[in-house]
Amino acid sequence: MLRDKLRQTIADAAGVDITEVQLEHPNLESYGDYSTNIAIKNKLDAKEIASKIPGASVAGSGFINITLSQDVLLSLISNVCDMPDIGQGKTVIVEYSSPNIAKHFGIGHLRSTIIGQALYNLYKTLGYKTVGDNHLGDWGTQFGKLLYMIDKYDLVDYDIEKLEEIYIEFHKLAENNKTLEDEARKWFKKLEDGDKWAREIWHKCIQISLREFDRIYDLLEVKIDHAYGESFYEGKMQEIIKLAKEKVAIHSEGAWIIETGHESPLILLKSDGGTTYATRDLATILYRTTEFDPVKIIYEVGVEQTLYFAQLFSASRKLGLVSGQVELVHTKHGLYLAPEGRKFSTREGNTVKLDEVLEEAINRAKTLGCTDIRTATAVGIGAIKYFDLSHGIQSNIIFDWDRILALQGNSSPYLQYTHARIMSVLAKNNSPLSFPSLKLREGVGGELNPEELSILRWIYRFPEVIEEAASRYSPNLLCNFIYELAQRYNTFYNKHPILGNEFRLALTKSVGDVLKKGLNLLGIEAPEKM
Ligand code: ARG
């Protein structure tokens, strides 16, 4: 990649190691395309270093600014969509979505699904072997509560609505009746011990839930490689429990716990001998490391589980489940807030029906003029995804239909529209466009105009942005990048005729390719027509 070549050139010129050279893009483009403070940091002579680097000049402060020549900019554009293969031979596991059986697919799980899929795509395009896993919440004490209620009411027929209703009712009843939690625990124990009826009901709950989840995944066009789910680890927990008891677990008030240096310990086994969410997560880590040998495991899970993941990660290191080289990452996405700034909530039964939200997005896309259902779906669903991804992962998002579907500003319909317009320009062109072999300057007659140059000085950053978006778990960097590109392109488009000019057509094609690839990496379709 250009950036790394440049870093090497600077390192050689300054006589330092490449790892010391940091390159930034100056905020003002008049300062150049890259800038480095290497001379200041190492108290070296900036002028002398700059004299050895093409396009370099020294700013008063001692920063070395580098302006890429038009030839360099032109040479970069032809393979701007080729990504550096930095992940070759390495595996990354991205765990995402992970909704809970017998509950509605929540808005938090929507965030996880959207962000997780984008991270998965980003790592994949950088050459990593990526493994996606949907860690379904299909095991645990909540099933004890459901079994207790289903048994109590002799329920035969139920859907998710009903299951959620009796779950909420259980908690209300349990407030005044302390024995209910024990009853639920007993039922969960029965399930764990293989009770036939309990297993049947559990299976039925899974079937009901998966039907709903699959409908949502279909709408979102998301396919996750695996959905092992918590129950997959049922038979794999004994190994962890044994290991933990031998190595680090402490017997405390009947339970087995692991001290992790955080404010509370991780519970390995409850006092009734039942396993926990954490026991299953430890078994999951062991399975993942042995099965896939990853360099990194990304947990795309909300900020509310921050303490839990800190405990889990320390416990798994203490147990030696992961070597020091393996990175464990909790992305901590922020909450969705209702328009008045309230928390979207399911606990008090004030449910957000996700499929209704998605349907609404598609209907609103129709009012934007997307007449066929395929385009309306691409635009409506794309808008929801982009709105989510254009926020920093860890910030909260206020749900705002007007901004989600805006045709102007940093929104997906705007980008899709720009892309579709590009496609229609290219469709009008009859002469062959032999990009990338095309000699870019043909037809320009020398100097590029400022609008063309402004595109060239932005578009070459695409691979850098992808790398940064992946390594910082920040798809919003990619959103900002393609939004800025679309704006620059539209300024150019409004000012200069394109048809009949081979260079401008080629430039148009490149912008179209980058917009499409950028949107696709975010999990968003780029329709040819809108
Ligand atoms: N099912 C969980 C929830 O909805 C999320 C799972 C997170 N992943 C994990 N490995 N614990 O809260």
Image (spheres, rainbow, N blue to C red):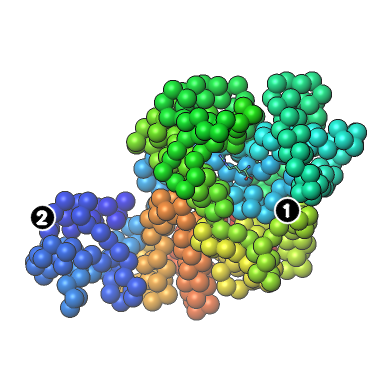
| Residue drawn 51% across the image and 38% down it | 266
Above or below — where is 343 with respect to 321? below
Picture quarter with ligand 1? top right
| Residue drawn 76% across the image and 21% down it | 195
Could you classify mark 2 by the number of other residues whose Cα lies within 10 Å: few (under 14), some (14-19), or many (20 or more)?
few
Above or below — where is 230 with respect to 476? above
Mark 2 beta carbon near ligand 1 (under 8 Å): no
Q: On the image, which quarter does residue 280 sit in?
A: top right
| Residue drawn 25% across the image and 52% down it | 5
| Residue drawn 31% across the image and 70% down it | 26
* Left or right of 382 on screen, residue 373: right
Marks 1 and 2, the one that precedes in the sequence: 2
Q: Position of residue 445 (x, y in %)?
A: 35, 72
Residue carrying label 2 = 15
Mark seen at residue 423: none
Mark seen at residue 347: 1
Q: CA distance from mark 1 to mark 2?
A: 61 Å
* Amino acid type assigned to the residue bearing label 1 in the image: Arg
* Amino acid type assigned to the residue bearing label 2 in the image: Gly
Is 383 or 252 nearer to us in this picture? 252
Q: Position of residue 518 (x, y in %)?
A: 51, 55
Above or below — where is 363 with respect to 318? below
* Left or right of 4 on screen, residue 105: right
Q: On the image, which quarter does residue 3 sit in?
A: bottom left
